[in-house]
Structure formats: C-alpha cells, structure tokens
Image (tube, rainbow, N blue to C red):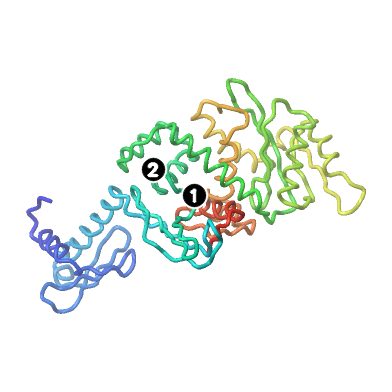
Amino acid sequence: MNTENPRELRGLAILAMGNQIKRIDTSTYRVRSQSGNGWYPVTRKGLQWMCECPDFIYRHIICKHIHAVQFSLNLRERVTSENLGFENVCSEVSACKYCGSTNIMKRGFRKKKGSRVQRFSCRDCGKRFVMEEAFERMKSTPKIITVALDLFFKGCSYRKIVDHLKQFYGVKVTHVAIIKWVRKYTELMKRYVDGLTPNVSEIWHTDEMAVNIKGQFLWLWNLIDHDTRFLLASQISVKREIEDARRVFAEAKALAKVKPDFVVTDGLRAYQDAFNKEFFTLRNPRTEHVRLAGLAKASNNNIVERLHGTVRERDKVMRGLKKEESDIIEGLRIYYNFIRPHMALNGKTPAEVANINLRLGRNRWEDLIRKSQKAVKKDKYIYIVE
C-alpha cells in the first residue's frame, strides 16, 4: 500500500508487528500502545471510529490505532473473499461402516481441494473409511455449492451464477454442474423434510397459477398455512379439475397429519367437489370451505399470491421450466419453508414458526443438506454422533 500519511504508516507498522490488535466484538478492539504503556480501546459507533488515545481526543483526527484496526479489517475481508480457506469436514462415527464394530479410531484426513475429511480405521477388520458426507467426492467445496444453490433459488440464472463464482471466488464451474447440484441436493433434502411434521394453524389457503413448462402452460397448485406461512403442498397438473385439486388437499393432510377448521380457496368449481371428497364429514368438528371470488379473493387470499410472486421470480428468469416433474418446484418449497426468512414472521422461517427448529446455522443450506444426509444414511450402518 502506498501512502504518505505518517499515521497510516504507523498503523501499518502496528499491524505488521502481530498480536498488537485484540478483537473484543464486532465494534470494539484494543490496540497496544507502541510505547508499551498499556492498550487503547478503539470503538465504532455507526460509521465513526473513536479511540481513547491523546492524538484522537485532543486533535480530533484519525489516529494510528484506528488506522491499524481498519487495515486489519480490510485484510480480513480480503482473505475471506479471495481465499475460501481450508475447511475441515470432521464428522464423528460410532461404528465401522463395514463390520459394525465400535472399536474404531481416527486415522488422519483425506485431503481434497479446499477441504479435508476425517478418516477412520477399524481395529477389528482393519479397514479404513471416511464418513459418507453429503459433499464427499465433490470437486467444489460445500461453500461454493451452497452459494450456487442460494443464488439459484433467489432468482439468478445458471450462467449468472457461473459468472458470480468466477468473479468473486475465482472458481470455474459450468452451468451443467450447477444444474446437477440443484437436482442432487433437492432430492436429498426432500427425502428428509417430507418426514418432518409442522405444527400448523386452523386456516389453510390454496390457489393455482399458470407456469410455462416446455412451452406449454400448466397449473401449479399451492396450499399454505395461514399463521406459519408453511407451504404444505405443491402440485403441477395439466388441467384444473376435481382430481387435481383433490391431490393438493390430500398431500397437505398427509404432511400436517391434521385437518383445518377452514380451507380458503377462490371460486373455482373444482375446489368445491374436491373439498367435499377430502374434508366433508357429519361429525364435529367440521372443516368449513370458504370460497372467495372477485375483489374478495384479492384481499383475503394474498398469502398464496405472495408465494406465487416468489415462484414467478424464478420462473421468469428461466423463461419457463424444463420438465413437468420439476426439481425446481420442490427446491422452491424447501427454500420457502426452511431457508428464506419472512418479514411477516419477524425474520423467522415458516419451519421455525411451525415448531420445526432444526437449529440451522449461518449457512442454512449446508446445515440442512448435512442433516438430510445423516437422516437417509441411518439404515446403512453409519451412525452419526451429534
């Protein structure tokens, strides 16, 4: 860095010495005095940095301690953006994947580009093995894969994602690789989340929208819970007939394992007959069918309409879906329920409000994929210790 400011030069000198800057939190740091007489607190309030050294207090200028902290933050940001790091994938197992013995031990790491995977050895059968992780044998790191998934379901095209990964991460992948990632991990997560039961409210909303699939406009049916915004069912059909609407109701009942007090639909005739076949009973409590039409539909069924806006963002970028049994629809359902925070839910996901708290961390995609992998591997002699 070229600079003629003496305080900036002294700040660089402080940073170069090492161990001179201590991070307390995201807005508070301590910088050692170059005279050796203690430490100076450096804090940030909004966009303004402040220091308790005499240079800042009496001269009201950016001192060398503030420059040192700023240089440190810039360096950290540069390393984070340009270097993906060396990620440890170190899952624990309780039994050998070959013989089932619990007499196992750790035996180094299997290294691959950008990460390393814990390797184990069985003392009984003598075989070495690694965990069947969700990202095992993938050329790209979990961070790159999950960034691509997130960008895709937020509306970016495949080729825009390719450009983004190359520009900001220095990673070259093809759009075909991203397509495979979307299909692979959507299928994996679907097998897991379909076994989770949400705690939903007494009011369900359903509506249909036209989607372009192979140049033909088909119908996408969605059924969503009122309080949690949890998407209970999604179906694609060629027509809007009774059996099509009935499949949506049946899927929602199977997932929620309860019947609602009210089902809100538009004035489509098929809903009435499908409702009678799936929900009608002479016993109390009964589920009531609320049919909306015209202006009433626009003002009272807007929960589903907002969901359709999210689907439309993805559909518009792709200029239509590629096949009827589309992975995109299932992936959007997972994204909507488990990944995307909702402003109407105070920043929570529908799954969290529906009491499905998977404790997903900062990278929700990666955590959900790993949990899904653990769930589907339980019957293959692999037991995960949390």
Q: Which mark is residue 139?
A: 2
Q: Residue at 27% of width from left, 56% of height from top?
A: 76
* x then y, percent, for residue 133: 48, 52
Residue nearest the observer in this picture, 278 or 171: 171
For numbered disc 1, what is the local secondary structure? loop
Residue occupied by mark 1: 134
Amino acid type shown at disc 2: Lys
In this rendering, the answer to whether 196 lies above or below 290 is: below
Q: Residue at 48% of width from left, 58% of height from top?
A: 361
* x then y, percent, for residue 101: 54, 64
Residue nearest the observer in this picture, 27 or 147: 147
Quadrant housing residue 128: bottom left
Q: Residue at 72% of width from left, 32% of height from top?
A: 294
How far is disc 2 from disc 1 in space, using C-alphas? 12 Å
Amino acid type shown at disc 1: Ala
Q: Is residue 139 left or right of residue 244?
A: left
Regarding residue 343, the answer to whether it shows in the image is no
Circle 1 packing at 10 Å, graded few (<14), some (14-19), many (20+), is some
* x then y, percent, for residue 231: 64, 45
Q: Is residue 310 left or right of residue 85?
A: right
